[in-house]
Amino acid sequence: MTHEFSAGQNAPLTGRTLRFAASAQVQLDLCAFVVDDLLQVATSDDVVFYNQPATAGVRVEGDTIVLEPDAVRPGARVLCAVGAESTTSVSTTLCHADGTLLASFHITPVTGTESALLCWEIYRRNGNWKMRALGAGYAGGLAEMFTAHGVVVDEPADAAPAQADAAPPTTGTELPPSCELVWRIFEDASRSAAAYVAAHEYAQHRLDDELSVAVADPAARTGEAAETARAQAHRRCEELVAAAEARHRADSVTLTAELETVDAVLPASLASWDSGAWRGTLVPGDGVRVGELSAPERGALRLPLCVPLPLGRPLWIDGETAVAGAVASSLALRLLSARPGSRLDIIDPSGSLRALGGLARPMLAGPPIHDVAGVAPKLKGLAEAADLTGLALSSGADTRRPEPRVIVLAGLPHGFDSIDLVNIVHLARMSSAQNISIVITGADDDVVDNPAYDLLHDASQHLPASEDGHLADPWTNTDWRFAADTLPGDTEFLHRVVATLEVGGG
C-alpha cells in the first residue's frame, strides 16, 4: 500500500491501535473529535486534547494521540485534527502501536488562511474500520472547528475547550438506517471525487511551476536541455493524472458494487424502479429517493440521492410546470409507499397532475382540485383539520399517530392567493408532528411580492426538475449533475404498485 495519501483517499485500517502525530514549522495542538455520521459530537466528553486527555478509545499520550477504534463508542467515528497560532503546512502520520508507518498525509492550506486543519477520519464501513485523509481547514482556528462539529465554545478553543457542551441535535437532518446506507456511499463517492479533482489541480499546478522554472533563464529557454526539462514536466503531470484516474476508477467500481448490493435490500421508496422491492409486499421506508447524481466528466458512476422521513420541510421542484409535475408524481408515489395507509391530496390548478390523480385514485383523500375556485376551500379545510388534530394531541385526548398525508401542490404561485399561501406555510410548520409530506412544483418567480410566498420558498428544500440540474455535496462541495426521479413508462407496472399500496393501506 502507498503510504503517502492525498485528500479524500481512503484505505482499510490494519491493526487495532494506532498513533496520530503531526509536525510543522510552528507549535501544533493535536485534538480529536468522536462524532456521529453527521460529524457532530454527542457530549463534551467526545473532545480529546491537552486539557481533556482521554475518552473511550482515544487518548493523548505525549505528543501523539492514540486511537483504539474498537473501544470507541458504538456508531461513532473519529476525526484527528491540529490547530496552530498561524497558518502553516502540516505533515501528519498514522502509525501502528510499534511506530511502523501506516500512512502519511501532507496538508497545505488551500486559501492560506486556515489555522486549524482536519487531518484524518477513522470510520467504520460494512463492519470494517477504514482511514481517510481529509485536509479541510478553518480560518477561524480551533474555535471555528469546534463549533462546526457541534461544540459550544465559551472561551477560545485553544485556551479552554474543556468548558464545551454538546450542541442540541439538529432537527430534520438525522438519517435513519436505510437512508444512512445510501448516504454513506454518497459520502465515499464525494470524498473520492474531491481527491480526484484535487489531484488533477495539483498535477496542473506543478506542471505550470516546472515549466516556469524551465523558462526562467532566457539563456536556457531553448535547446535540447530545455526540451528535455519540459518533456519531463509533462510526463510527471501525466503520471500524476493517470494515478488519480486509476484510484478514482477503482473507487467507482467498488461503490457501484456496493450500490447494487444495497439496492436489493432497500425499501421501495428508496430503491430504484428496477428493484424487486416494488414487485412484492411493500414495506415502510425511512426516506424517499428524489433522483440520481452523476459526473460524466469523472466517470460512469450514478448515485441515488435520498431525503429522510419525516420531511422536515416541503420538497419544492423547480422547473417548467409539466416537467416538474412528472417529478412530483414520482415523489408522491414513493411517499405513499413509504407510509402504508397514506392519503393523497392533489391541488393542481395548473392541470399538470391529472395523470397522477387517475393513477393514485384509491389513495385519494378527496377529489383532486384542478380549478382555481377550489384551491382556497381545500387548503382552508386541510389547515383547520391539522389544527384540530394538533389540539387533540396536545390535550392528550387523542394519542394516536395522525394518519400519514401526502399533499401535492402544483404550479405555485399561480392559482394560489395570499391566504392560500399562508395556509400552506401553516401546514408546513405542522408537517413533522402530524405525518404530513408536502411536495410543491413551481418555477422560481422573482416578481412575486408576497411575504408568505417568500417564506414558503425559503423554507422549502429545492430540487431542479431539469436534466442539467446541479447540486453540490455537503462534505466536499464537489459539483454533481442531478437528474430528478420520474415514474417509469410501464403503466401496467405502476397499476400493480398502486394495487399493492391499496392493499397495504387496508
Image: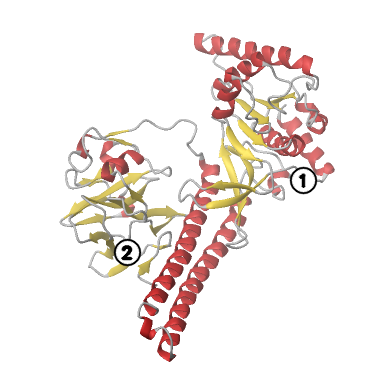
| Image spot of residue 451 (x, y percent) | 57, 19
Of pointers 1 and 2, the one earlier in the residue sequence: 2
Q: Residue at x 59, y 28 (%)?
A: 457
Q: Which mark is residue 355?
A: none
Q: Is residue 381 left or right of residue 179?
A: right
| Image spot of residue 37 (x, y percent) | 43, 44
Residue 41 appears in the picture as rendered: no
Q: Which residue is mark 1?
A: 488
Examine the rendered structure and indicate whether residue 351 appears above or below residue 482: above
- Nearest to viewer (mark 1 / mark 2): 2
Q: Residue at x 57, y 24 (%)?
A: 454
The type of residue carrying mark 2 is His
- At mark 1, the secondary structure is loop
Q: Which residue is mark 2?
A: 106
The type of residue carrying mark 1 is Pro
Examine the rendered structure and indicate whether residue 17 appears above or below residue 351: below
**Crowd rating for badge 1 (residues with CA inside 10 Å; few <14, some 14–19, many 20+):** few
What is the residue that sits farthest to the front in this orientation? 218
Residue 47 appears in the picture as rendered: yes
- Residue 402: which quarter of the image? top right
What is the residue that sits farthest to the bottom in this orientation? 224
- Residue 385: which quarter of the image? top right
Q: Is residue 72 left or right of residue 500?
A: left
Q: Residue at x 57, y 62 (%)?
A: 298
